Amino acid sequence: MTGHIAALYRHPVKGFTPERLGHADLTSGGPFPCDRLYAVENGPSGFNPAAPAFISKQKFTVLAAIPEVAQARTAYDEASHTLSASAPGQPDFEGPMADEAGQAAFTAWLAALLGDAAQGPLRVIQAPGHRFMDHPLGHVSIINLATVRDLEARMGRPVDPLRFRGNVYVEGWPAWVENEWAGRELMVGFARVKVYKPIVRCAATHVDPATAERDMDVVKALFDNYGHMNLGVYVHVTDGGRLTVGDACTQPEPPQ
């Protein structure tokens, strides 16, 4: 059975607004383009830009720790490296993320928004070629929308797929089939990818991305209904290619 790409999203600043795309170009062995380029430390994280390494998301301003982050609406201009942001009761922000002055201006804006919810001090961090993923090998994430709808039915209430902060959202696959695909290859648009592992979910999914309220326990619902806390899969790109909304996503061949 073949599904199709229903939506594509990038998250230029970890924890902040997903940005919808019409297409994305994947490269062999690489991450999703312009995804998790920056993170905001919530107090010293130990990150060293000269020797970048994986840091737990708990060190950053992310929804799992600070639901109020979802009040910010951010947009990133890749060509100019300019970030714009808005939030209720806050002046609009726009500044360059490529220099320390722009980064400091954004963290000052964010500190005013978050107030006591952030322990701080806040600081934008980045390093060339480094991505602030939830898992050190979580290159690209895929969400099966039928799986989200099955969870909705079990919970008896709507579940916004953006709670899962994926890169590629797929229609047309049976619910939960992706949990059985670890180690198998599939075509996503014109790229070939290999499924790495299911994504274990955390309290970030409890936050409504529209209201910034922690309003449902998705992790408990997953465990109570399915006996695990997984939703979505991480994949690694084995052959690069363009993904465009509407492109086919072919399920892997059954193992021999």
Image (spheres, rainbow, N blue to C red):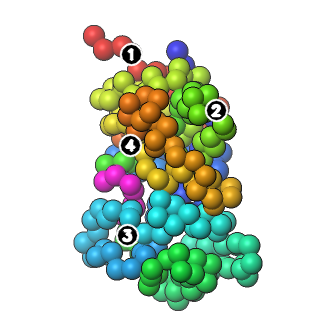
Which element type, helix, strand or loop, lies under badge 1? Answer: loop
Q: Taking 256 as reference, is 17 left or right?
A: right
Please determine whether, in this image, residue 63 is positioned above or below residue 7.
below
Alpha-carbon distance for marks 4 and 3?
18 Å
As drawn, which residue projects farthest toward the top? 256
Distance in Å between CA atoms under marks 3 and 2 = 33 Å
Task: Describe the element under mark 3 as helix, strand or loop.
Answer: helix
Q: Residue at x 29, y 62 (%)?
A: 54
Residue flagged by tag 1: what amino acid is it? Glu
Question: Tag 4's secondary structure?
Answer: strand
* Sooner in the amino-acid sequence: mark 1 or mark 3: 3
Residue 67 position within the rendered picture, expressed as x and y whole percent measured from the top left: 56, 63
Q: Which residue is mark 2?
A: 156
Q: Is residue 126 above or below residue 5?
A: below
Circle 1/circle 3 CB separation < 8 Å: no
Q: Which residue is pictured at 47% across the width and 53% down the height?
A: 203
Question: Are there few (<14), some (14-19), or many (20+) residues within 10 Å of tag 3?
Answer: some
Would you say residue 181 sits in the magenta stretch? no
The residue lying toward the viewer, choosing from 226 and 77, is 226
Residue 228 at x, y percent in the picture:
38, 34
- The residue drawn where x is 33% and y is 62% is 56
Of the image marks 4 and 1, the number of the one nearer the N terminus: 4
Quadrant in which residue 182 is drawn: top left
Residue 182 in the figure: left or right of residue 5: left
Kindly tell me whether residue 34 is visible in this rendering: no
Quarter holding residue 113: bottom right
Q: Which mark is residue 59?
A: 3
- Which contiguous range is marked in magenta? 130-136
3D distance between C-alphas at marks 1 and 3: 40 Å
Quadrant location of the C terminus in the rendered image:
top left
Q: Which residue is mark 4?
A: 200
